Amino acid sequence: MCSFKCGFIFFNMVFMASGVALLTIGVLHKSNFQELEEFAGKTLAKIAIVLIAVGSIIAVVSILGCLGAFFNSYNLVVTFICCLIIIILMEIITGAVVYTFYNKMVSALANITGSVNYMDKIKRVISEYSPEKRAAIDRIQEKFKCCGADGPDDWATSVGWEDHEATPDSCCVEKGAGCGKEKDKAHKKGCIKAINLFLGKRLQAVGVICICLAIAECFGVVIGACFSCDIKRKDYDNMS
């Protein structure tokens, strides 16, 4: 039994590490995605929450597997296998959803929120520049080193921005009070392009991680099944 048991324990250690990694990725991305809510809606933040939830569940289930191995408990190991199959399905679904968002963004930049066009929403938010959203817009422009939706010229037609000959100071390459009045010193890259680059890399990475974990966890199901059969066989031998 030792070969299966040792393999099962090793898998659980790796499994727990992957859960902690997913949890960490979710926590780190949640703050970044929340900053983009004004532009891309709340769907991105929900993806981060799913990663946190899956990572936490993996950590708890891995402990269940370790207890099953420690006590040679058939019931605990079978419960672990069932939970693992559910986690695999969750990861496949999460990976598929992430890749769907990524492909839409790359091919058409359309419908991240399910009802509002991604590009149009960014343009509308910039055009309106409403008082309650100005702080969020300025943070985005500073964080992603971008200006306007497609570029600095968007501020010349913004309804909410009064000085059409200038840009908000958050657009400036070198920050300073009133620096936005020098429009030629603003970032040339639009926020649509900057956000696409940011999301594209991260969504692709999250999708790959979820799918790879799901494939690797299939090995855990197999070795768990073999280990549980060995436990059952040993119980029968002890009874006879």
Image (tube, rainbow, N blue to C red):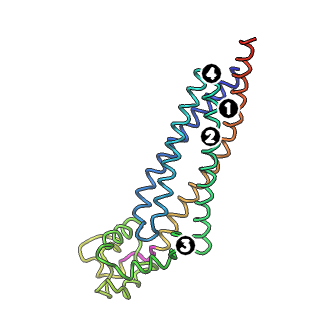
Q: Reading the chain from its start, which is encountered first: label 1 or label 2?
A: 2
Disc 1: CA contacts within 10 A as few (<14), some (14-19) or many (>=20) = many
Q: Quadrant of the N terminus?
A: top right
Q: Reading the chain from its start, which is encountered first: label 1 or label 3?
A: 3
In this view, 45 is above or below 16: below
Whole-percent x, y for residue 103 in the image = 62, 67
Span shown in magenta? 186-191
Contact (CB < 8 A) between labels 1 and 2? yes
Whole-percent x, y for residue 62 in the image = 56, 34
Contact (CB < 8 A) between labels 2 and 4? no
CA distance for labels 3 and 2: 32 Å
Name the residue: 55% across, 60% down: 201
Name the residue: 69% across, 27% down: 228
Residue picked out by circle 3 = 111
Residue picked out by circle 2 = 84
Determine the image quadrant of residue 100: bottom right
Q: Secondary structure at mark 2?
A: helix
**Mark 3 or 2: the one toward you:** 2
Q: Quadrant of the C terminus?
A: top right
In this view, 61 is above or below 2: below
Residue 224: mark: 1
Q: Is residue 139 magenta?
A: no
Determine the image quadrant of residue 14: top right
Q: Reading the chain from its start, which is encountered first: label 1 or label 4?
A: 4
Q: Secondary structure at mark 4?
A: loop
Q: Is residue 190 magenta?
A: yes
Residue 72: mark: 4
